Image: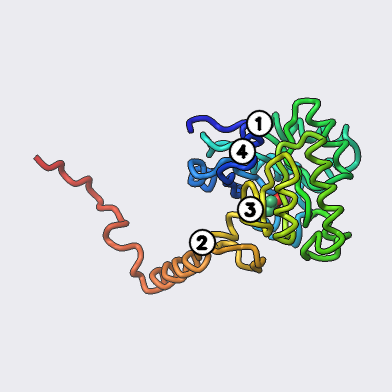
Amino acid sequence: RKTAPLPDDIRARKGGTPIVSLTAYTTPMAELMDAHCDFVLVGDSVGMVLHGLPSTIGVTMEMMILHGQAVKRGLRQAMMVVDMPFGSYEESPQQAFRNAARIMSETGAGAVKLEGGQGMAETIAFLVARGIPVMAHIGLTPQSINTLGGYKVQGRGAAGTQLMADAQAVAEAGAFAVVLEKVPQTLADRITADVPIPTIGIGASAGCDGQVLVVDDMLGLFTKFKPKFVKRYANLGEQAEAAVAAYAEEVRTRAFPAVDHVFADAVPEAKS
Ligand code: KIV
Ligand code: NA
């Protein structure tokens, strides 16, 4: 693949080879995942992962735009989706359009993502009708942490009926895909079977139409806590700390810089 897929290309992957996605917040990380991911998500998880915030509630439009611009510079082949931050879209479809249009025009995103099901369907339809592709996000929606009462599994038992209705509602509203976060596997499989748009799972099911993870989680760079649904494919945080410790030791013992890292007074004569 040479050019980034469009939201309609992602939609057409329903039931096919699983869609691959990770989050990214910086140019170098975007560059290294570009050839391997169908879309890269500039998640509002950036607030917790890179800025040390206690939740995603404090993430601003300015943060999303700045990180979106950085990620876009690192992408050639993957589509970029940018999260709408808390407070930027819930008030009205008009407010959502104004902020989504800013994200699209200032970052070059292919789509925006927002949290919510039935309650956001009208807003999703409003954006899609005005040229803004929308990825929905239901189940555990971290921006609602203060009303959900914790980061617990969503849609267990009877609550599964509401989640299925949410998935159907965002699909009918025109979302091209829907993230299912932290829901029971059987429910994720039923939603995937019944809803006409791709489901992107995180803590959901291998049966989803795609998967997404927070890159710093799967690389072992963010280690404050590890949700059960995260698989660590590397332990880069440990490696980075060991490297810093080795550097500190070598500076204190004057082992660094060594001869390879310093300069002679005169430029050496060219070999003949
Ligand atoms: O912000 C984020 O990283 C996300 C993904 C976990 C889906 O929304
Ligand atoms: Na998010």
N-terminal-most mark, 3 or 2: 3
Cβ of mark 4 under 8 Å from ligand 1: the answer is no
| Amino acid type at image mark 3 | Gly
Q: Nearer the viewer, mark 1 or mark 4?
A: 4
Q: Which residue is mark 1?
A: 8
Neighbourhood count class around disc 3 (C-alpha, 10 Å): few under 14, some 14–19, many 20 upward: some
Q: Which residue is mark 4?
A: 13
Q: Nearer the viewer, mark 1 or mark 2?
A: 1
**Measured Cα–Cα span from mark 3 to mark 2:** 20 Å
Q: Which residue is mark 2?
A: 233
| Amino acid type at image mark 2 | Tyr
**Measured Cα–Cα span from mark 3 to mark 4:** 13 Å
- Percent across and percent down for residue 116 are 82, 47
For residue 245, above or below residue 124 = below
N-terminal-most mark, 3 or 4: 4
- Percent across and percent down for residue 61 are 76, 42
Drawn side of residue 191 relative to residue 230, left or right = right
